[in-house]
């Protein structure tokens, strides 16, 4: 079997597991008062070129819901892409932890928020209009839920529209590493310098083991968030093991190395798809995910050939590349697509 089901079906990076074993010595205070968690603050502040607070959490859902809960009142409205994971796959955790927060879906291409459509949505609620919830935040997903990547300008446009109305900006960075690897920019440019106040910093999908994090760029959010985290059971007593994982994740650029690997495999598949017109891409392949519209029956053929992937509908398949997916596995997928779908001769390049 060749597994393209998800980026969480694979292994954790050995460097991260080694860090867990190395942290297993002596005694250390609980609940984040340990030396690893202090070091984590310094390491992430260096990485983001500004003083940040980092809170390890168990899952991306916890990161999203609690970050959003820290942004505003329980009657707040958070704007996001209609395809955003917070809107489609988190059992309304944001609404639950935010005490009633409502999500409002905004259209856009390839899982992005279109800044003009956001402005239109915001114009529909006048400030102080008592019969509606009040806009409080915007959440964008980087890389998007269709595997596309916002450019720095696109993030800036969404941020500007949000800030004009006094809203906070959250980034769901479950695949932030893939986006930064794609953009070739600094983590700072992709976040706070573009207007992001708080982010969910994914690690698990990209070779992590057991934790993600919330990174806070706007310090006034920290105290409220800390209480939200405690109340939601997201403050480990043996926090050093969570912090050790995240330190190892970014140490020596490991996180970007792994993201470049999975992006590279996806790009190899993208190149192979160019002469298979029957496989239609739903969004450009800019990170590590591939969404393909396939003719009826093609998915059965791929499964018979030994490939695992998610069927999103009768004709839509999702393939996800992991940091440990091999070039041979990429070539095998292309060969199977060619076998099942046929090719056309390539135009001279
Ligand atoms: C874009 C995005 N955000 C958040 C999550 C949530 O992560 P978790 O499953 O760890 O809660 C996922 C998981 O698939 C995701 O794809």
Image (cartoon, rainbow, N blue to C red):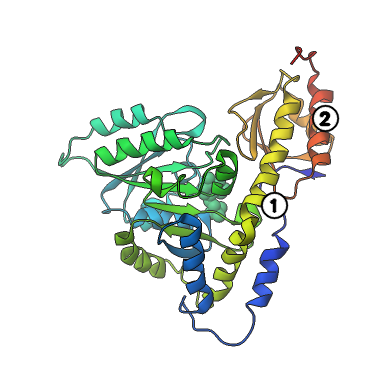
Location of residue 265 with respect to 273 vertically, above or below: below
* Disc 1 residue lies near ligand 1 with CB under 8 A: no
Along the viewing direction, whichever of 167 and 180 lies nearer the viewer: 180
Among the 4 quarters of the image, the one containing residue 179: top right
Q: Secondary structure at mark 1?
A: loop
> Residue 22: image x %, image y %?
67, 76
Q: Which residue is mark 2?
A: 336
Question: In the image, what residue occupies the spot 70% across and 52% down?
Answer: 9
Location of residue 57 with respect to 312 vertically, above or below: below
Mark before the other along the chain sequence, 2 or 1: 1
Q: Quadrant of the C terminus?
A: top right
Q: Which residue is mark 1?
A: 9
Location of residue 336 with respect to 8 vertically, above or below: above
Q: CA distance from mark 2 to mark 1?
A: 21 Å
Q: Residues within 10 Å of mark 2 (few under 14, many from 20)?
A: some
Along the viewing direction, whichever of 199 and 291 lies nearer the viewer: 199
Along the viewing direction, whichever of 45 and 99 lies nearer the viewer: 45
Q: Residues within 10 Å of mark 1 (few under 14, many from 20)?
A: few
The reply to whether residue 32 is visible in this rendering is yes
Say whether residue 144 is left or right of residue 227.
right
Say whether residue 101 is left or right of residue 61.
left
């Amino acid at each position: 079997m060749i597994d393209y089901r998800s980026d969480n079906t694979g292994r954790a990076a050995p460097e991260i597991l080694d860090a867990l074993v190395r942290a297993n010595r002596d005694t250390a205070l609980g609940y984040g008062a340990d030396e690893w968690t202090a070091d984590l603050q310094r390491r992430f502040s260096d990485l983001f070129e500004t003083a940040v607070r980092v809170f390890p959490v168990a899952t991306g859902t916890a990161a999203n819901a609690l970050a959003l809960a820290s942004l505003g009142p329980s009657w707040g409205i958070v704007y996001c892409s209609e395809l955003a994971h917070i809107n489609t796959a988190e059992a309304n955790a944001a609404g639950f932890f935010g005490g009633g927060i409502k999500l409002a879906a905004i259209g856009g291409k390839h899982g992005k928020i279109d800044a003009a459509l956001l402005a239109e949505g915001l114009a529909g609620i006048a400030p102080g209009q008592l019969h509606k919830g009040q806009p409080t935040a915007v959440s964008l997903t980087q890389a998007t839920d269709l595997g596309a990547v916002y450019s720095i300008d696109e993030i800036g446009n969404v941020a500007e529209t949000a800030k004009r109305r006094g809203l906070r900006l959250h980034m769901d960075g479950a695949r932030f590493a893939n986006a930064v690897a794609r953009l070739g920019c600094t983590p700072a440019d992709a976040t706070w310098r573009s207007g992001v106040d708080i982010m969910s910093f994914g690690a698990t999908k990209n070779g992590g083991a057991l934790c993600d994090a919330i990174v806070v760029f706007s310090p006034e959010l920290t105290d409220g968030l800390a209480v939200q985290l405690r109340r939601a059971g997201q403050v480990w007593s043996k926090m050093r093991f969570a912090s050790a994982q995240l330190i190892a994740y970014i140490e020596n650029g490991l996180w970007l190395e792994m993201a470049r690997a999975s992006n590279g495999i996806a790009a190899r598949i993208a190149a192979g798809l160019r002469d298979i017109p029957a496989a239609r891409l739903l969004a450009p392949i800019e990170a590590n995910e591939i969404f393909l519209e396939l003719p009826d029956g093609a998915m059965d053929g791929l499964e018979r050939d030994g490939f695992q992937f998610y069927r999103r509908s009768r004709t839509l398949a999702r393939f996800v590349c992991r940091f440990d997916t091999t070039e041979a596995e990429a070539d095998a997928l292309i060969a199977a697509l060619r076998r099942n779908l046929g090719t056309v001769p390539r135009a001279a390049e």
